Image: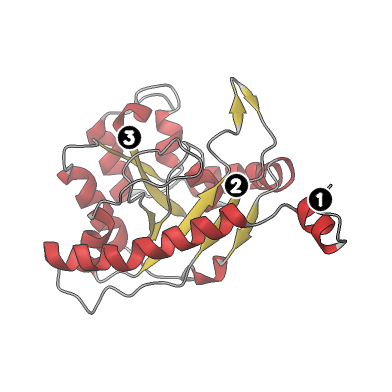
Amino acid sequence: MGAVTTQEAHRYAREQGVARGLYAVVRFLLTPVFRLYFRLHISGAEHIPAEGAAIVTPNHKSFWDSFFTAVATPRHMRFMAKRELFDPWYGGLLLRLGAFPVDRGSGDAEALETARVILEQGGLLELFPEGTRIRDSEELGAPKRGAARLALETGTPIVPAAITGTDKIFWGPIPVPRRVQVAFAEPVAAIALEATPEGAAALTETVWPEVESQFRRLRSRPGLIAAGLAAAGLSGL
């Protein structure tokens, strides 16, 4: 599959979408690994619309975030990925699995247009409001307004989401069996505001607290062993 140019990637993303057979095979292989090895716990997946355009907005901790959130729904999850990821040998693979490139920090008009096309086609699009990975496992970054802007311009609902545990799942090349959790909140409609900078700011101020709330809830959620000990009155152990 190999590396792909920006033009090739956007054309494929708009016209082809995903390679359905490859997507199904990768999901089939990853799902049991995620659920057993990383003890993946998913909550609120019913809030993802079964059909039609929607934007999922999780916090961002790892390259693997999109793979974990994609396992939560039978729909094809589309997502932006930094341009540099399309240069190595796996660039074509990422493209066929639903990714498309974005030049971060430049207000990439081409990436925004591809995102609009995906939403106009009724697709499920994942955007990370923080814009980059936040390494601190206990903290979130400041949200940008790109997702809200797209939602208002296309009349698309936003599904706030949160993910924890993906920031340290590798020790060098070795996967570490950490517990990963993903949560989705109820969709936020984007029809009551105008597609203006002020409207995007207001929508972001509605959506991001939901992401923060889900993130804090996941961070405070005890593991199975801890919960069992607490229930037995042995939490001191």
Q: From this viewpoint, which residue is outermost toward the bottom?
A: 192
- Image quadrant for the N terminus? top left
Characterize the local packing of mark 1: few (<14), some (14-19) or many (20 or more) Cα atoms within 10 angstroms: few
In-front residue for pair 140/118: 140
Residue type, mark 1 in image: Gly
Q: Is residue 165 left or right of residue 38?
A: left
Q: Which mark is residue 27?
A: 2
Q: From this viewpoint, which residue is outermost toward the front?
A: 236
Residue type, mark 2 in image: Arg
**Residue 84 occupies which quadrant of the picture?**
top left
Quick one: SS at disc 2?
helix
**Residue 132 occupies which quadrant of the picture?**
top left
Residue at 57% in and 52% down = 219
Residue placed under numbered mark 1 in the picture: 236
Characterize the local packing of mark 2: few (<14), some (14-19) or many (20 or more) Cα atoms within 10 angstroms: some
Residue at 17% in and 68% down = 199
Which tag, 3 or 2, sits closer to the chain's start? Answer: 2
Q: How is the image coloured?
A: secondary structure
Which tag, 1 or 2, sits closer to the chain's start? Answer: 2
Image location of residue 86, percent across then percent down:
35, 29
Q: Nearer the viewer, mark 3 or mark 2?
A: 3
Residue at 31% in and 43% down = 131
Image location of residue 65, percent across then percent down:
49, 44
Query: Alpha-carbon distance for marks 1 and 2?
Result: 40 Å
Please indicate, yes or no, whether residue 123 appears anywhere in the rendered image: no
Residue at 40% in and 51% down = 78
Query: Alpha-carbon distance for marks 3 and 1?
Result: 45 Å
Residue type, mark 3 in image: Lys
Residue placed under numbered mark 3 in the picture: 82
Do tag 1 and tag 2 residues touch (Cβ < 8 Å)? no
Q: Is residue 60 left or right of residue 104?
A: right
